Amino acid sequence: MSRARAALRAAREAGDAYESAVAEDELDDALRMAHEHGVATDDES
């Protein structure tokens, strides 16, 4: 998930709306899958 967070941060810093949306979706998917499998994340949602 650190890669997904880094990709999102980089896209936002670059001001790239499309890449930000893609990276956000990928992060959301990774967090959802982690939660479904009982993997702890530093995300509170």
Image (spheres, rainbow, N blue to C red):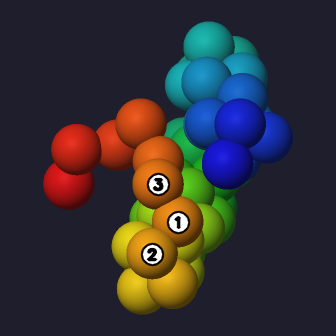
Q: Are marks 2 and 1 in contact (CB under 8 Å)?
A: yes
* Rendered location of residue 21, percent (x, y): 52, 56
Q: Residues within 10 Å of mark 2 (few under 14, many from 20)?
A: few
- Is 44 on the left-hand or right-hand side of 6? left
Q: Residue at 79% of width from left, 41% of height from top?
A: 3
Residue most extreme to the right: 3
- Residue 18's label in the rendered image is none
* Foreground residue among 41 and 6: 41
* Rendered location of residue 44, percent (x, y): 22, 44
Q: Residue at 71% of width from left, 36% of height from top?
A: 2
Q: Are marks 3 and 1 in contact (CB under 8 Å)?
A: yes
Q: Is residue 39 above or below residue 15?
A: below
Give the amino acid type for the residue marked by disc 1 in the picture. Answer: Val
Give the amino acid type for the residue marked by disc 3 in the picture. Answer: Ala
Dot 1: what SS? loop
* Rendered location of residue 19, percent (x, y): 68, 48
- Residue 39's label in the rendered image is 1
- Residue, disc 3: 40
Dot 3: what SS? loop
Q: Are marks 3 and 2 in contact (CB under 8 Å)?
A: yes
**What is the C-alpha distance between the residues marked 3 and 1?**
4 Å
Residue most extreme to the left: 45
- Residue 38's label in the rendered image is 2
Q: Is residue 17 above or below residue 10?
A: below
